[in-house]
Amino acid sequence: MRDQKALQRGHLLAMIQTLMDERVNQMFTEAINAYQTDALGISPVSGANDEEVSEYFEKMKQDGFVVLPQVDRDTIDQMRMWILQQPVRLESNLGDRLSLMPVDEARHKMNVGKLEAPASINCPHLLPLATDPLRLGIAARWCDTRPTILLTLIWWSFAGRPGAKDAQLFHLDLDDHRFCKFFIYLTDVTEEDGPHVFVPGSHTPTALLEAAQASDDPQVYQEWLLKKLRKTDEEVKQYFATDPVSLTGPAGTNFIAVTRGVHKGLMPVRNDRLVCQVVYGATPFLQIPNEPQSIATDATSNVPDYLAEPPIDFTTRYMLRK
């Protein structure tokens, strides 16, 4: 634990192994859950096995994503109005961190503008939505333990840029050994407004192994899957028989996706897209190399006090402090 770089490398290697082997993946999950309950005394998420949670979870387990009930318009309007007041940080395709600037200025410079992490944590309604019984229950079922929120992220995808970049191209995520992501659109999203695009079923080891067996050269496929960060539409079509699905809908459309499956955020061509994301994981992998991203739950915060109380404080442990 004192050698964070070595720990991160080991964790990444374990995630690659479990990506292709459901039996090993399940063994990891059982060990994590046992440690949480036996050593730490952390209680399970209540209601994780409720009928409504189970219905949505089974759909997500099958396809890799599930669309959830619409968030009401007043909530969306309050979130969007708050975000419009926040500056964004641009990121170059080389990973350089550039200056903070207003959204109106940023949209003429880069494909994507992200809010700073502490600002995204403090977005009104975001964490209460992400920790409500339905969404947290689905995340708990997928992680098979009480999940931790590893990251909150809010970003603009700007329309009219010269070409797609970075996560606007197909890829898969290795954020944790077991993880899923909650997305919510704060703008209307049609096919022309940058929908999330997902290859159904590609999140399962079975689908990945079947694609390898069907390929002309399984070794080339393995290299493509795990070592080529961005993937073309043609390559995805070559390896997967299932057509990608675009998740469109009005502002307030929200879903949970297992983004170890092949996916992308399509580059918008008509209107800017504004989206929030919350990442749930079984282990604190994302936060290991970073400084803690936390805000106080006090009078200046948009985050309710109860999210820093047991047992939910285990879920929000990297985000909140009293």
Image: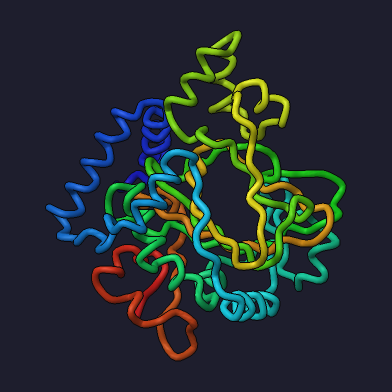
Q: Which residue is drawn at 27% across and 51% down?
A: 145
Residue 264 seen: no
The vertical placement of 259 against 110, above or below, is above
The vertical placement of 165 against 120, above or below, is above
Q: Quadrant of residue 136?
A: bottom left
Q: Residue furthest bottom?
A: 299
Number of numbered discs overlaid on the protein picture: 0
- Residue 45 drawn at (x, y percent): 26, 61
The vertical placement of 152 against 65, above or below, is below
Between 14 and 307, the one nearer to me in the picture: 307
Q: Is residue 82 left or right of residue 152?
A: right
Residue 3 seen: yes
- Residue 127 drawn at (x, y percent): 45, 70
- Which image quadrant: the C terminus? bottom left
Q: Residue at x 44, y 32 (%)?
A: 204
Q: How is the image coloured?
A: rainbow
Q: In this view, does 24 lie to the left or right of 115?
A: left
The vertical placement of 118 against 148, above or below, is below
Q: In this view, does 221 lie to the left or right of 291?
A: right
- Residue 283 drawn at (x, y percent): 34, 49
Q: Which residue is drawn at 40% across and 48% down?
A: 285
Q: Residue at x 54, y 70 (%)?
A: 71
- Residue 201 drawn at (x, y percent): 50, 34
Q: Residue furthest left?
A: 38
